[in-house]
Amino acid sequence: MGTVNMKVLLLFALVAAAAAWPNFGFQSDAGGAADAQKQHDVNFLLHKIYGDIRDSNLKGKADSFDPEANLSHYSDGGKAVQKLMRDLKDNRLLQQRHWFSLFNPRQREEALMLFDVLIHCKDWDTFVSNAAYFRQIMNEGEFVYALYVAVIHSPLSEHVVLPPLYEVTPHLFTNSEVIEAAYRAKQTQKPGKFKSSFTGTKKNPEQRVAYFGEDIGMNTHHVTWHMEFPFWWDDKYSHHLDRKGENFFWVHHQLTVRFDAERLSNYLDPVDELHWEKPIVQGFAPHTTYKYGGQFPSRPDNVDFEDVDGVARIRDLLIVESRIRDAIAHGYIVDRAGNHIDIMNERGIDVLGDVIESSLYSPNVQYYGALHNTAHIVLGRQSDPHGKYDLPPGVLEHFETATRDPSFFRLHKYMDNIFKEHKDSLPPYTVEELTFAGVSVDNVAIEGELETFFEDFEYNLINAVDDTEQIPDVEISTYVPRLNHKDFKIKIDVSNNKGQEVLATVRIFAWPHLDNNGIEFTFDEGRWNAIELDKFWVKLPAGTHHFERKSSESAVTVPDVPSFATLFEKTKEALAGADSGLTDFESATGIPNRFLLPKGNEQGLEFDLVVAVTDGAADAAVDGLHENTEFNHYGSHGKYPDNRPHGYPLDRKVPDERVFEDLPNFGHIQVKVFNHGEYIQHD
Ligand SMILES: *[C@@H]1O[C@H](CO)[C@@H](O)[C@H](O)[C@H]1NC(C)=O
Ligand SMILES: [Cu+2]
């Protein structure tokens, strides 16, 4: 009996390990040279997507490959490829030169059919041949989406760096005026560098924070996060995405609190939550145009919500919201079979995230609906709710463009407050739970001034314009202002009086000291508004320690995505045997490092900066975290690294702030973030 149980347990352990990152059945990685070739292939697959493939080898594959010729190259026996080929032969696929939106059910289905093919390719040659083949046939937007998600999730492309989407599909990120200038430059064969400015004018106070929602790096972070954790993800593709619902909450919670900190920096009130029965206060004129399909629709100020034909009625959204609030009040979710799922614990937020988004992980989409996704479409369509004018989808129906519309932040404030209702319903943390016995934070200090500035950033627009191989390329680019900060270090003194080495988790947050009326935030308000600055693990031998953490090392951020030009150059060098130097850029899921600090202002915006050092051995969900340099803030290879909830230990209420102020393993200082109007102009 005992042995049988052991075997069952062992089997479970094996299955669980495999589920996180399935490698069996795939060709083993041949290392550097193979990675360089993969990078080369992906570069060319995503370059000039509206024209011919410019690599002869890839073009050859695209022209001659027969996806159904040998089905043993697919881990699903060719099921996915046969399904897609059938729709292709029956002429059911969306044409090329048409807009694509992930929120359009049929278009999503088509993109996912291609993703399904790619994720089931057992070797790179099959993967790349299919990608090249379908690039020539399928809608460009569907192709780009499917390839991005497949490269992110397939073990075959683990080390491939995806090019920045703002250079692959510049139309979604660039103002129409600049795109028009780019077309003229191409036509007249005159190189050009064009200045982009943010939408709107100074008459619109929202313009003061447009640098946040319209930042192309912020847009890249948001869209990449949604590709890492797609709402349509089904574990049958390959593996389970750990803590997906909670990640959904946290990534948007951070955008929400960050945006409010930007507003405070610019003397604006915090965002009000969206209310289905009140007008949408802020209008929006996107000033962006689809490559094919016309302009993104605008919306005037103070529009009342209308039902959107074929999508949802406003009262249905209210019903779904009240069911979710009921679940929070009851402390459980009712699944499809009528069973209760307890959410009064630290895993409750994960279930709630799945429910609110909703993703396929939602235990009961029939009952709780899809509040977030439906709201995006309903809000995106308010310019043409009945489809009378045949307008294309709004910016809110694309993760690339959604944050440009100020109502995105209203919508997310509304959902964030629902999550808050749940977090506030959980039992408060006690001193005993938060103490790391024997370990204390003795001092926290900042080296260097916390100072932000604006600078011009240039990116290439060559993929925006039409071209053929007969007409030579000319250099066309745009430069946009973007926020950055000076380097700084956080210096921490810690004592370990345990008499032996311990693993510690260091969590660093900051929240604005005063609200928009100059009233000090209470601890409870502050902790909810905390911006996560860093989280890392260190080994602390017995004794006292001084360590310094550079702003550039922050584990919640990623460096700028390398440009197409850099990728081409590095790939060439790597193919010739050099190190690609691209390892640091494998993930674009974090916020850009230059966005680590909110803007601040001339007088210095005051923040409470806190450092919590907790028991790393209890927190760590995987080994070797103290040596990790890979971006894994939302988990990597399907596994989330931290046993604690996102935002721990500030994610729940405490009886009062003395709990923290008396904790030896908690440090708290006041800092100021300055912006002296410095602007590093483009030469
Ligand atoms: C199909 O692919 C498998 C695996 O690569 C190979 O062993 C087999 O020979 C191929 N069959 C044909 C008919 O090419
Ligand atoms: Cu989002």
Image (cartoon, rainbow, N blue to C red):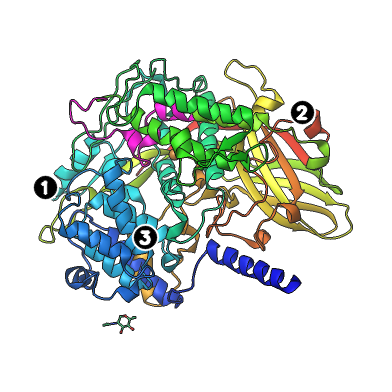
Q: Earlier in the sequence, mark 1 or mark 3?
A: 1
CB under 8 Å between discs 1 and 3? no
Q: Quadrant of residue 610?
A: top right
Q: Amino acid at mark 1?
A: Thr
Instruction: Determine the CA span between mark 2 and mark 3.
Output: 49 Å
- Name the residue beneath numbered marker 2: 657
Instruction: Say which amino acid is labelled 3.
Output: Thr
Q: Report the amino acid beneath label 2.
A: Glu
Horizontal relation, residue 357 to residue 419: left or right? left
Foreground pick, 88 / 95:
88
Q: Is residue 421 one of those drawn in magenta?
A: no
Looking at the rendered structure, the secondary structure element under dot 3 is helix
Q: Give the quadrant of the N terminus.
A: bottom right
Give the residue at mark 3. 566
Where residue 225 appears, x then y in whole percent? 46, 47
Separation of marks 1 and 3 at Cα, in angstroms = 26 Å
Q: Is residue 420 above or below residue 135?
A: above
Residue 100 is labelled as none
Q: Nearer the viewer, mark 1 or mark 3?
A: 3
